[in-house]
Amino acid sequence: IMILGVGSLPQPLWTMVHVVTPGVLSNGILQWSWYFTRAVLRLAMKDPRAGRDNTIRIIAFNAAIILLTVGMWKQQSWLTVTTAGAVGVIIAWHGLALVSCLRTRFGNRLAVLVQYYAVAAGFLVLGCVYAGFVTVAMFDNGAPAWVVSMRDDLTLAHALVNLLGWVGITILGTLIMLGPTILRGPLTGYA
């Protein structure tokens, strides 16, 4: 049985993994982290950080992901590294906007949730740096020997930082802070 896409797409394993992770999970994180941030910090509906700016970030993120995919499929190191950098910049903007919201509304007992989201964003920025090194090791014939020799280690670091840091910390923070709220239980230790 042939797995969907294997053999018919360039970079099939990369494509399947990255359609799910940046495509689905990261878009969900970008959208829902702002939804929860706006709710727990009681941001005004007209606050540009939680409205217009978030929409711009999501559009820019998706455009960068499309270009990243083109770069990988065409095996163009410069395009892939550039767009991985663009993803890192967009996510850094997301994290800084979260921190900006915290500075104005930190008194809320659920503000800790936004701290989880900001830390998670930092992990994805780091993951984008690792992605750049992995891409250079894969596609650049003039890559330094140390980058080529560390390709597998860099790939593992990229995967772990993104999965455990970006996705894991986001999910963990949401469950720890909103789980008791949903179950109508007390938030012990956060009062």
Image (spheres, helix red, strand yellow):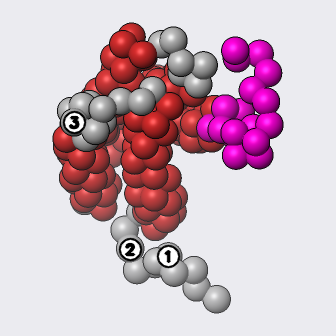
Pointer 1 with pointer 2, Cβ within 8 A: yes
Number of the front mark, 2 or 3: 3
**Residue at 28% across / 38% down in the picture?**
45
**1 or 3: tag closer to the N-terminus:** 1
Label 3 secondary element = loop
At label 2, counting other C-alpha atoms closer than 10 Å, the crowd grade (few under 14, some 14-19, many 20 or more) is few
In the picture of the structure, the residue carrying the numbered disc 3 is: 46
**Which of the two residues, 115 or 68, is positioned nearer the viewer here?**
115
Which amino acid, by three-letter code, is at mark 1?
Answer: Val
What numbered label is drawn on residue 6? 1
Q: Alpha carbon of mark 1 to alpha carbon of mark 3: how far?
A: 46 Å
Compared across the picture, whether 174 is left or right of 111 comes to right
Magenta residues (range) = 174-191
Q: Alpha carbon of mark 1 to alpha carbon of mark 2: how far?
A: 6 Å
In the picture of the structure, the residue carrying the numbered disc 2 is: 9
Label 1 secondary element = loop
Label 2 secondary element = loop
Number of the front mark, 1 or 3: 3
Answer above or below: position of 99 versus 142.
above
**2 or 3: tag closer to the N-terminus:** 2
